[in-house]
Amino acid sequence: MTIEQALKTRSESKCELCSSENNLAVYAVPASEDKSAGCCVLLCDTCRGQLENPETTDENHWRCLNDTMWSQVPAVQVMVYRQLKRLSTKTDWAMDLVDMMYVEDDVKEWAEKGLVEEEQASIPTRDANGAILQAGDSVTIIKDLPVKGSSMVIKRGTPVRNISLTDNPLHIQGRADGVQMVIISAYTKK
């Protein structure tokens, strides 16, 4: 049985968030351990489109979560929790639903992990002057930096070429004085 077939059986061929029966497709829950049916949901075009492009969110569409939040499927619970958390900054009804919703600790941890990853992905890495840094940029160190675990000091004015970004928007990775290291981006300038 394919993932899509398993999800259609589980959801009775309806969107697992809004119960629509139109244009259903498999959606892998972000920040999941694997891509099995247990980590996927079946969504309609409307739900999928608004999740992938949050700027197009129609808050009234998501009132369906009032019913969906009682689902026993962990992947659905994760998606409902995340969407309600996003909406709770804009609407009181979503905040009330988040307060009423019950999820097991492991499901809540999975849901929170995805929210943290989304938050970090939306925060750009910036240098000391506020310029956004991209992978491949060249920067210059703006103050003497001691290297942890050694007596080495990277001097002010040292160039770092072809940087790469890390999971943390406050850090970059690059080669300074021939040594590959993680550098706090606030101590660099483009």
Image (cartoon, rainbow, N blue to C red):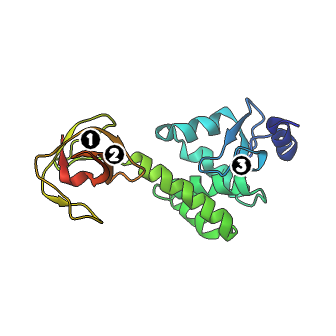
In this figure, which residue is indicated by the disc labeled 1? 132
Q: Please state the horizontal and vertical placement of residue 53, each as a whole percent of the image.
A: 51, 37
Q: Identify residue type, mark 3.
A: Cys
Number of other residues with Cα within 10 Å of mark 3, as a class: few under 14, some 14 to 19, many 20 or more = many
Where 160 falls versus 107 (above or below)?
Answer: above
Residue lying at 65% horizontally and 56% vertically, measured from the top left: 78
Q: CA distance from mark 3 to mark 2?
A: 28 Å
Quarter-of-image position of residue 110: bottom right
Residue sitting at 88 percent across and 42 percent down? 9
For marks 1 and 2, the one nearer the N-term is 2
Identify the residue position indicated by label 2 in the image.
124
Q: Nearer the viewer, residue 79 or 140?
A: 140
Task: Name the amino acid, label 1.
Answer: Ile
C-beta proximity under 8 Å, tags 1 and 2: yes
**Residue named by callout 3:** 39
Give whichever of 159, 177 is nearer the camera: 177
Q: Position of residue 20 (x, y in %)?
A: 75, 38
Quarter of the figure with residue 101: bottom right
Label 1 environment density (alpha carbons within 10 Å; few <14, some 14–19, many ≥20): some
Mark 2, other Cα within 10 Å: few <14 / some 14–19 / many ≥20 = some
Is residue 32 at all visible to an observer of this figure? yes
